Amino acid sequence: MILSVCPNPSVDVFVWIDAIHPGKVNRATREDHFPGGKGVHVALACTEMGEEVTLMGFWGGPTGDWIKHECLRKGIESTGIQVPEWSRICQSFKSEGAFDETEILGVGPAITSQQQDEFMGKFRQLLPAFSSVSMSGSWPQGSSPDAYARLIQLCHQRKLPVFLDCSGQELELALKERPYAVHLNSAEAAALFGRSGPEKLAAELAGYCSLAAITAGKEGLYLSNGKKMVHGKVDVEHCFSAVGSGDCLMAGLMVATLAKQDLHDSARMGVACGAANCLNRELGILHRSDVDELLPRVELKPMKLRK
């Protein structure tokens, strides 16, 4: 079983609009709503791929209740802490103009140190029921930057592998605890290490974890276990939206790891899951049939480790 930690879940709104004119009234032509947040995307993708998942987060007001309800409809139980302020709303725009693919990420609730400690206590109690843990995305306002680091310490006590995807100070502190796997996009990794080049970034990241995943958009995935590196990519036509593709890729790596697949097959699964997310109108959601169709098309190439 997988525990997917999503401290700051959201309602993701896909807004269709012909164009955006600053300073004027703009009218959307369509809106679609989806349960969101990086950890929610991971949970949805893992569930679609046949894994049993529980989702843990801070759930705020009516929007938090709606996210939990939508996840339950897809077979995912939710746990965590209920807070009064609403969970955030994030908007992605689809238009013919310059604002296409523009995202506006909502703020979400603020939490107290007591609520964070309550979250930590519940997390500790839940761990015996799970075989691996995913930790993804930001934390709500008011949380301490070492929150993920503290959760990883608890996982180490039970020898549970942690799959991590976050950024900023939360990432820097969490890496000191050596999670099992880390996924970053190339921009996040470049900001962390002060250098560029996905191959070099994957090699450097592998110094902090057992499985380092760097994604570089259409260039694909660079995956390293510290001894070997493989590059994987697959071309898809008519990419609808890439929002959530990194989260679906992370889910693919988790599924492959639980199945004890090697580095190459793990890269293949991760790339296929990430690409499958691009093929439909649902944000951060893949379909297993798409993954199955993409798997044999993934191109893999061994790479030299270059630090």
Image: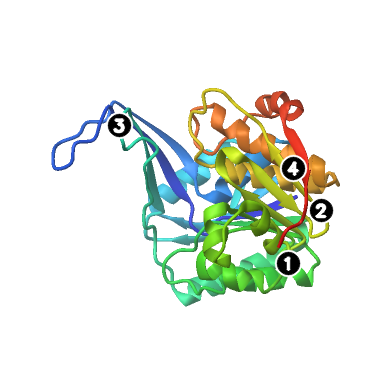
- How far, Cα to Cα, is label 1 from label 4? 18 Å
**Neighbours of disc 2 within 10 Å: few (<14), some (14-19), many (20+):** some
Residue 171 placement, left or right of 289 = left
**Neighbours of disc 1 within 10 Å: few (<14), some (14-19), many (20+):** some
User: Camera-side residue: 162 or 69?
Assistant: 162
Image spot of residue 170 (x, y percent): 54, 69
The nearer-to-camera label among 4 and 2 is 2
Q: Amino acid at mark 1?
A: Gly
User: Camera-side residue: 102 or 229?
Assistant: 229
Residue occupied by mark 2: 228
Residue occupied by mark 3: 97
Give the mark, 3 or 2, whose residue is nearer the N terminus.
3
Look at the image and tell me whether residue 221 can be seen.
Answer: yes
- How far, Cα to Cα, is label 3 from label 4? 35 Å
Give the mark, 3 or 4, whose residue is nearer the N terminus.
3
Contact flag, marks 3 and 2 (Cβ < 8 Å): no
Image spot of residue 262 (x, y percent): 85, 46
Q: Amino acid at mark 2?
A: Lys
Give the mark, 1 or 4, whose residue is nearer the N terminus.
1
Determine the secondary structure under disc 1: loop
Give the mark, 3 or 1, whose residue is nearer the N terminus.
3
Look at the image and tell me whether residue 166 can be seen.
Answer: no
**Neighbours of disc 3 within 10 Å: few (<14), some (14-19), many (20+):** few
Residue occupied by mark 1: 207
